[in-house]
Amino acid sequence: MTDASDYDLFARIAELGSISAAAARLGISAPMASKRLARLEARLGARLINRSTRRIVLTGAGQTFRDDAVAILNAIQAAEARLAGTTQTLSGPLRVSAPTSFGRMHVAPYLKPFLEAHPQIEFTLDLSDRFVDVLGDGVDLALRISRGMPASLTSWVLAPNRRILCASPAYLDRNGRPATLRDLHQHMLLAAQGQSPWRLAGPEGAVTFDVKSAVQTNSSEVVRELALTGLGIALRSLWDVNADLAAGRLVRVLDNHEGLTDVHIQAVHLRHATQPRRVTAFIDYLRGLYQPIAPWER
């Protein structure tokens, strides 16, 4: 008997290149996914994939069946939408990953309208400061604050990521305000692991500045908290400290220097021809939130 769920499983394995990633996306165990794939191959009388220790590769029969399976699944989805009387109904799992601070401040507070508009979406928000593996972690959409993206991913720029040098008024009262980049050598500086050197743009063009942080930490949130307590000067994104600047808890220093503008807030997903509408709908929703001017820039 034909089981469309097995077709869906195989299509996701072909899309993600991994049985375990497909299993995670569907919320089943990897052994169960392997068992169902074996059952599908036995029913079809053909091997669909060749397994290796690192990845899977579709056989010739698997490539042909993948195209047919995707077409069948799209036809089923369209038929269900027509029966429901709308092509706008979005459903199914949507797993989104975001950096911890950004997700807490600029994603989670805005989820309610999206989920109320699409109540059949099973939404998961994972917050982590590590560089999430979209394929290996079974993520539908990852928000990243970075420069380039590998060719295997499709990226959508959501907003620029302006970064400024700042410190608390109390710190500047005690230690004075730097007038030049060279003056920073006489100050306490704050940066998380991986955030040195600072890449800055100023009157002299693009420069890099090596930072020896007063505190070693893997948390960008800790850097902001340390700056607020008056420990030193930090390079922070406007989305992170805009409220603190407005309230006077932090003030900008070296106004003629900012982080290089080649870093953006991006939404990324695996590059493939067919993207679930729930993914593109959430990308459009985020673009509506952050464009043409992001809230933290207003």
Image (cartoon, grey):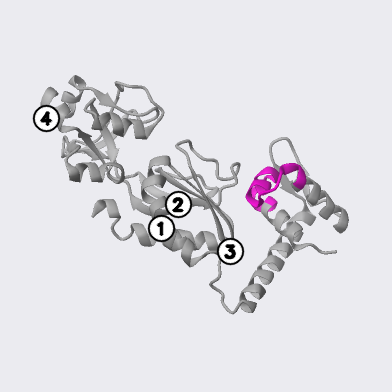
Cα separation between marks 4 and 1: 38 Å
Q: Is residue 60 above or below residue 254?
A: below
Disc 1 marks which residue? Answer: 286
Amino acid found under the numbered disc labelled 1: Leu
- Where is residue 154? Give x, y as percent: 50, 53
Using a 10 Å C-alpha cutoff, classify the residue at mark 1 as few (fewer than 14 neighbours), some (14 to 19) or many (20 or more). some
Q: Earlier in the sequence, mark 1 or mark 3?
A: 3
Q: Is residue 27 magenta?
A: yes
Please report the residue visible at 40 percent of the width from the left and 29 percent of the height from the top. Answer: 194
The boundaries of the magenta stretch are: 13-32
| Element carrying mark 3 | loop
**Pointer 2: what residue?**
267
Which amino acid is tagged 3? Ser
What is the number of callouts on the image? Answer: 4
Residue 16 vs residue 61, the one in the foreground: 16
Chief secondary structure of the magenta portion: helix
Q: Are marks 1 and 2 in contact (CB under 8 Å)?
A: yes
Q: Which mark is residue 179?
A: 4
Q: Nearer the viewer, residue 225 or 146?
A: 225
Residue in the image at 36% along x and 22% along y: 216
Q: Is residue 86 above or below residue 96?
A: below
